[in-house]
Amino acid sequence: MSKELIIGLTESGRDSLLRTAQAVPEDKLNWKPLDNGRTVLDLLGDAAQMPLFAIQLMEQKESFQFDRERFQQATQARATWTRDEAIEHLNRNTKQMIAAIGALTDEELNTPIHLPMGGGMTLPLSGWLMMAYRTFTSRFAQINYIQTLYGDFES
């Protein structure tokens, strides 16, 4: 998978997520479906933090270890963000991730990385870097669904 493809899809996913998140009225940003679901702000903050995971993975490669405490700290940090702060983090972190991807060699992109997700998976680093894109597009879809639940059916 080429750097250009990873970067292009990541930017496209981020842009779609931004358009959707910016269309949510202020009074619906913390609304939860069925009082159990995730809020738009939590979904946006989660997506904003994903590029940091990708950067950490690029830095550590084969020695990467999932840090549950760091994950919990990130979850707590984003709980206080406003929409503008989440968008600022999303843009800044994505920009940093894209710069780091640009510095990778083809050999590094093809380095197999094993992570414990889903019972354990090995993918080339390039495949794992697509996690930011997948997070952006899945959060985009989740926010779109939340919008329909509170009555917004405009595209």
Image (cartoon, rainbow, N blue to C red):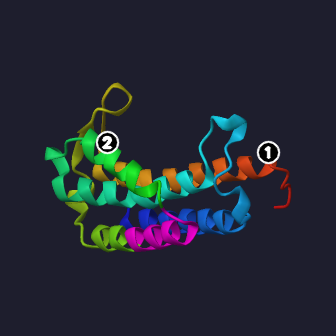
Q: In this view, does 18 lie to the left or right of 3?
A: right
Quadrant in the rendering for residue 149: top right
94 or 150: nearer the viewer:
150
Quadrant in the rendering for residue 14: bottom right
118 or 6: nearer the viewer:
118
Residue found 23% across the figure and 44% down from its top:
112
Magenta stretch: give its range.
81-94
Residue found 74% across the figure and 64% down from its top:
25
Q: How crowded is mark 1: few (under 14 residues within 10 Å), some or many (20 or more)?
A: few
**Residue 138 lies in the magenta stretch:** no
Residue bearing mark 1? 149
Separation of residues labelled 2 and 1 (CA atoms): 36 Å
Question: What amino acid is found at the position of numbered circle 2 in the picture?
Answer: Leu
Question: What amino acid is found at the position of numbered circle 1 in the picture?
Answer: Leu
Residue 152 drawn at (x, y percent):
83, 56
Residue found 73% across the figure and 47% down from its top:
145
- What quarter of the picture does the C terminus occupy? bottom right
Q: In this view, does 152 lie to the left or right of 136?
A: right
SS state under label 2: strand
Residue found 57% across the figure and 56% down from its top:
41
The residue sitting at the left extreme is: 63
Residue bearing mark 2? 123
